[in-house]
Image (cartoon, rainbow, N blue to C red):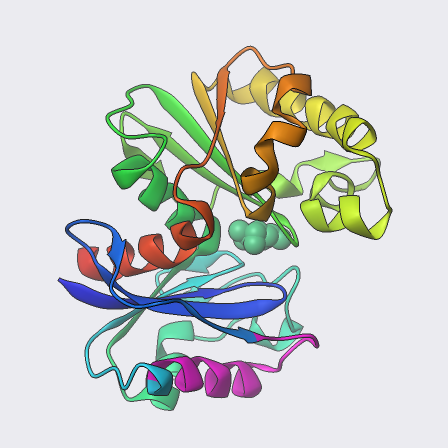
């Protein structure tokens, strides 16, 4: 199947048509920066611009950075609060005129890694963490996904852990890799204490810089960088569209 995958992020909206059999992008990614928090209406226009860029007539799968229950958006930690309670599929369908499915962005990246990337054919508990503007998580047991696992919001010092360990925080605070990894190790230890994954896959933009920090990571689980790079969110969003 050919589905247009769109990844809504904290700082940009990216999309590309995807062959869901192979996980390959069928055209170069198209990216629109979103430097300010877009309202739902403005975001819908941005998504429609991605659809128009590819002159896309088929179905669209969208990864959204918040809890998505059915197609209802329940949280939007790093986006405009106006999304909360909206039917996301309806919002984006109205703006694009296409059949639209919606999934949490980290769940999408996780689907792509388990199908085509670092988690291929892996049994047992596999955790995919995306480190970007926030911290996303996708949890699988024997290939079955636990939806909306939201482990970036485990509490730490009265706030969400993502406020200490995301890739955005590293940049904003000017942390060295060593300083940031000290935080990340604490986070990973907390996650491992409760979930005991056998494999942890680190995704998000920083995964392409894995040689800078992977040797400093201390986990019980085997830990590897994501293999799908910055296409994971797009490919996974398309995969979830194919499932529905
Ligand atoms: C959101 C998650 C999302 C993650 C990465 C978190 O703040 O709550 O739903 O997956 O950011 O975008």
Q: Residue at x 61, y 82 (%)?
A: 39
Residue 183 place in picture, x, y as percent: 77, 29
- In the figure, residue 15 lies in which quadrant? bottom left
Nearest the viewer among 145 and 115 is: 115
In this rendering, is residue 187 above or below 161? above
Q: Residue at x 40, y 85 (%)?
A: 48
- In the figure, residue 206 lies in which quadrant? top right
Instruction: Assign the magenta stretch its main secondary structure.
Output: helix
In this rendering, is residue 77 above or below 88? above
The quarter of the rendered structure image containing the C terminus is: bottom left
Q: Is residue 244 visible?
A: no
In this rendering, is residue 234 above or below 101? above
Q: Residue at x 38, y 59 (%)?
A: 234
Residue 31 place in picture, x, y as percent: 49, 72
Q: Does the segment drawn in magenta span residue 35?
A: yes
In the image, taking residue 75 as reference, residue 144 lies left or right, namely: left
Residue 27 place in picture, x, y as percent: 29, 68
Q: Residue at x 65, y 19 (%)?
A: 217
The quarter of the rendered structure image containing the N terminus is: bottom left
Residue 208 place in picture, x, y as percent: 54, 41
In the image, taking residue 233 as reference, residue 202 lies left or right, namely: right
Nearest the viewer among 148 and 38 is: 38
Stretch of the chain drawn in magenta: 33-51
Q: How many marks?
A: 0
């Amino acid at each position: 199947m050919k589905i247009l995958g769109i990844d809504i992020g904290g700082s940009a909206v990216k999309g590309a048509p995807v062959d869901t059999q192979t996980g390959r992008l069928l055209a170069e990614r198209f990216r629109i920066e979103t430097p300010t928090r877009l309202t739902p209406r403005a975001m819908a226009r941005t998504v429609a611009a991605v659809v128009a860029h590819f002159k896309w007539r088929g179905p669209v799968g969208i990864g959204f950075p918040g809890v998505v229950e059915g197609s209802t958006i329940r949280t939007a930690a790093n986006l405009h609060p106006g999304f909360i309670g909206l039917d996301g599929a309806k919002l984006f369908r109205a703006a694009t005129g296409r059949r639209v499915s919606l999934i949490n962005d980290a769940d999408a990246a996780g689907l792509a890694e388990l199908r085509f990337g670092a988690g291929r054919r892996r049994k047992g508990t596999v955790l995919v963490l995306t480190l970007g503007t926030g911290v996303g998580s996708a949890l699988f047991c024997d290939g079955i996904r636990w939806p909306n696992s939201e482990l970036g919001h485990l509490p730490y010092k009265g706030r969400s852990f993502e406020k200490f360990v995301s890739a955005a925080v590293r940049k904003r605070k000017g942390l060295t890799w060593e300083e940031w990894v000290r935080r990340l190790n604490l986070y990973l230890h907390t996650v491992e204490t409760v979930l005991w994954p056998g494999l942890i896959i680190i995704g998000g933009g920083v995964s392409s810089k894995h040689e800078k920090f992977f040797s400093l990571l201390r986990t019980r689980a085997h830990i590897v960088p994501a293999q799908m790079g910055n296409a994971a969110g797009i490919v996974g969003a398309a995969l979830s569209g194919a499932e529905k």
